Amino acid sequence: MNKNIAAQLQPYYADFNVESRILLSGHSHQAWPDAAKKGMLDCYYDAAKHVDEKWGNALAKADCVRDFYRHLMGEPNGQIALGSSTHELILRFLSDLKYFKTSLNRPLKVVTTDGEFHSLRRQLQRLKELNCTIEVVPVHPSDTLAQRLMDKIDVDTDAVMLSAVFFNTSEIFDDVGLVAQAAKSLNVPCLVDAYHALNVVPFNLQRWQIESAFVVGGGYKYCQAGEGNCMMRIPADHKGSPIITGWYAEFDVLNQAPGKVGYGAGQSAFAGSTYDPVSHYRAVAVFDFFKQQQLTDVFLRDINQRQIGRLWQGIEAVGEHQLGLKLPEHHLQANGGFLSLTTDKASDWVQKLGEYNVLCDSRGHQLRLGTAPYVSDKQIDQALNIIEDIAKVI
């Protein structure tokens, strides 16, 4: 692997000023390459030139976004519904559950973990307040998580919803496929949040053994595509009829009977409605840039592992106790795209690091440091020196 890749890439990210800022925010919002700006301008010019006839070009861009995600998941003909956020897509998934379309004399039951992203956590918590049964299984100890989840799944379970990489700890859930298969054996839909895997942890559906699962993710993080580029992969044999349904879902059933709500097959059933296409123009420009620079998911994984390893070893070298920062319990190979450090002063660390132009974030007691391919070894070492200095006063 070329260790000077950051030096080669930084000139392509001039607008985000990646050379003079240490952006350890790669797990939350990666910088966009300058090519993204051309994509956004192309959207503007298409609208100016074609007015309402722009949608042919826009829908072609949407298909290119689908193709990028299909490639990442190793499913060339995969069914991909698009949305502005994973929350929007999760709502479509929930509204497709048989529970809402069948008279059942019991509460809705969903099995999940305590390590889920805010959109899912908050929505399920609200359902719990409405007397739904939300079985929240603790992530730790992670080596028994799969079995503990499977123990909660029964014939009365309506859905299983969990992550491939946990957004608090960055730990990869290698056994998510076992849970998905257990759910399938009982005809229970399983949704896997892959946002912290796509384009930083290779995510071939067959290797992960989750071909039976719905998968959500998006472009805001490791895909550098910005907002509005989320997706939900639909299992190949699934025939959906979500209650929350947009008028785009009628495109494939325009000959439906008057007064009837019809649904197309696969991704069509989960289609949304009129949206701002600039997000897809931007994404396609970024994905073309990735192809030009040969930034494959495998290559990006290699870069990320080396960068996270450098941070990890730097923390170890100074000493966790001296810094007041606890390293993960899992191994580096089981780590996703960012380093999660445990500290009671996580938010204070974010503020102090920001004063030194080091951008990162926190979640509860977790200080999250995320690298990106445009971050240099020199910048990582500078961040480590700053961390050591801050530890003396924080």
Image (cartoon, rainbow, N blue to C red):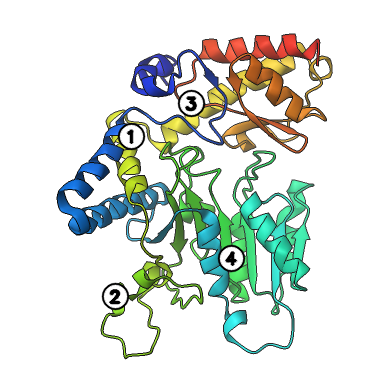
Q: In the image, what residue occupies the spot 78% across and 27% down?
A: 326
**Residue on which disc 3 sits:** 303
Q: The residue tagged with tag 1: helix, strand or loop?
A: helix
Q: Nearer the viewer, residue 187 or 370?
A: 370
Disc 3 packing (10 Å; few <14; some 14–19; many ≥20): many
Which quadrant of the figure contains the N terminus?
top left
The disc labelled 3 sits on which kind of residue?
Ile
Label 1 and label 4: CA atoms lie apart by 34 Å
Label 2 and label 1: CA atoms lie apart by 31 Å
Q: Earlier in the sequence, mark 3 or mark 4?
A: 4
- Mark 1 and mark 3 residues within 8 Å of each other at the beta carbon: no
Mark 2 or 1: in front is 1
- Mark 2 and mark 1 residues within 8 Å of each other at the beta carbon: no
Which labelled disc corresponds to residue 36? 1
Disc 2 packing (10 Å; few <14; some 14–19; many ≥20): some
Q: Earlier in the sequence, mark 3 or mark 2?
A: 2
Q: The residue tagged with tag 3: helix, strand or loop?
A: helix
| Residue 35, image x, y percentages | 30, 31
Q: In the image, what residue occupies the spot 55% across and 73% down?
A: 95
Q: Could you say which quadrant of the image residue 83 lies in?
A: bottom left
Label 3 and label 4: CA atoms lie apart by 31 Å
In the picture provided, is 38 more to the left or to the right than 155? left
In the picture provided, is 51 more to the left or to the right than 14? left
**Residue on which disc 4 sits:** 190
Which labelled disc corresponds to residue 252? 2
In the picture provided, is 147 more to the left or to the right than 65? right
Q: Is the residue 323 above or below the residue 29 in the image?
A: above
